[in-house]
Amino acid sequence: MKALKRQQIALFVLTSCLLLFGFFTPLGCGPMAGNKRGTHEGVPVDEEAIHNFCAYCHGMPPPEIFPRNAWKMEVERGYQFFEKAGLALKAPPLPGVVDWYEKKAPEKLDDSVPNRAKARGWITEDLPPWPETPPGGTAIAHLRYASKDPSSRPLLWAVDMRGGLICSWDPQKPLAWQSVIKGNHPCHLEPGDFDGDGLGDLLVSELGSFLPTDARKGRAVWHRGQSDGTFKETVLLENVGRVTDIKPLTSPGIWPMEFVVSAFGWNQTGEVWFVQIPALDADPKVWLKKEIDPRHGAIHILVRDWNGDGKQDFIALFGQEHECVTLYVNQGNGTFQSRNIYQGGHPGLGFSGIVQADLDGDGDVDLLLTNGDVLDQPYLLKPYHGVSWLENVGDLVFKHHSIGPMHGVHRALPLGRIEPGQGSPELVSVAFLPEEGFPYRKARDLPSVLLWTPKGKGQWEASVLESVFADHVTMAILSGQEFGRNAVAVGDFSGNKVPVKVFRRP
Ligand code: HEC
């Protein structure tokens, strides 16, 4: 999820004019701004100069990705990043660049909502209220349905990013959430018995701040299960940017243990880290902690032995200006060969989630992607937001296919597993279009949960499971007898009374 930039919007509204005044008093937010069309003091701004400048930090943003009236702010923001980065790069005059974009941009984006049928035969149930409501309300940033050790049954784990409480819900004791631990603005959790002692552990990614920040407040924390039911905290990594994901690379109880940590950070901080612990009682001073990618913006980490050499490789999904999927092939001892297996076309795509699953029934593992982060100003329904997949075509090559559009989509998951030869699985996707930014979401009946029914190999048709309440950045699939066929748990990030609701077939 990329709930991380939440209220960055508000901050930007407040700060952008102030910042710009500092940097660009003659050109910035004042009444004189942008009044010279196509030229800057008579000097035409040539397209190549714009390209060289704007495509320096990221893909060239095409004029059609924002409406005309948004470009001034987008361009000014590019100049702010440029000022802060201290690059030895020649910047063309700002008004000329704004003008170039404004002339080519559409008056407004196509914000039409595809006409889709309602999904039939589903019921909705509310899970119990959250045990403790923080000021501002709960913000469920992650849901995961899993067992924390092989001997216990799966529980639904939920993370409140605002209050910090992590709870579990047991389908066999459904009347209340069980408080488990508290973190400093946690946003992600991974249950499992990582040290192989038979007691379930939790890997908790802490942002360290609810609002986006470059402060090094992120922590990767391994909560090791104790025999009395409590947890003992082992900090894998601290003093880094906001941490969004932690995954083990080694099998339970195999030492040295290795972990990958994505520190999303924000603008100035953020990297991908490797942590190696030689033995359970080893002094943290002798742990190996290594930055393996200097880029910020990594949202999710997925582990898998992609080349079959017995070592776990991993994939990271990047948002921010990178908007790409990167594969890191494990060379052993903390070295990785990395390569982008997919590069999105422009920095405004807003990648929000990725999972690995067989999506075409051919027996290999593909990747399911969403891009729908809406938390940059201006709040807009973007026609390029949607669900897509990367087809594994062999030799670590992936082919991108669109599945379909969905405004504000933050997560998509296969509803069930398929066996090879069974075709594609059903998919479910959820959207985050907060009411403050999208006050028309009710009037326009914007979809918030979609069910995607397979129509032949790698093709899906969407129907609407829920609309209007697009407060979801996370979901989990619940399986087991009590759910009949698989059910879908969706989280609420907007502080509503019901933190999680479940959609299922009766
Ligand atoms: C010094 C590096 C740098 C330069 C130069 C730069 N940008 Fe960016 N740009 C960024 C970063 C960093 C982000 C990611 C910000 C985020 O997603 O919060 C970004 C994101 C964007 C986005 C996506 C915003 C969204 O809503 O998702 C657009 C559009 C964009 N830049 C346009 C431009 C244009 C136009 C120029 C040239 C005038 C430019 N940028 C120059 C660093 C740069």
Image (tube, helix red, strand yellow):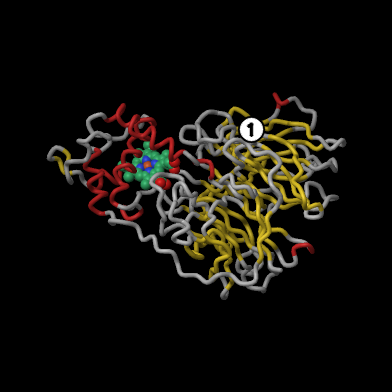
Query: Which residue is farthest left?
Result: 42
Of residues 173 and 236, which is closer to you in this image? 173
The answer to whether 312 appears left or right of 299 in the picture is right
Question: Residue at 69% of width from left, 62% of height from top?
Answer: 487
Residue 123 placed where, x, y %? 66, 65
The answer to whether 149 appears left or right of 476 in the picture is right
| Rendered-image quadrant of the C terminus | bottom right
Residue 259 in view, yes or no: yes
Vertical arrangement, residue 334 with respect to residue 150, above or below: above
Question: Residue at 64% of width from left, 48% of height from top?
Answer: 499
Residue 404 placed where, x, y %? 49, 65
Residue 104 placed where, x, y %? 25, 54
Residue 58 in view, yes or no: no
Vertical arrangement, residue 192 with respect to residue 231, above or below: below
Of residues 278 and 434, which is closer to you in this image? 434
Packing grade of label 1 (10 A; few <14, some 14-19, many >=20) is many
* Residue type (three-letter) at the residue carrying disc 1: Asn
Residue designated by label 1: 184
Vertical arrangement, residue 472 with respect to residue 276, above or below: below
Question: Residue at 25% of width from left, 29% of height from top?
Answer: 25
Vertical arrangement, residue 265 with respect to residue 461, above or below: above
Which corner quadrant of the image does residue 452 belong to? bottom right
Identify the element where label 1 is drawn.
loop
Question: Residue at 63% of width from left, 54% of height from top?
Answer: 490
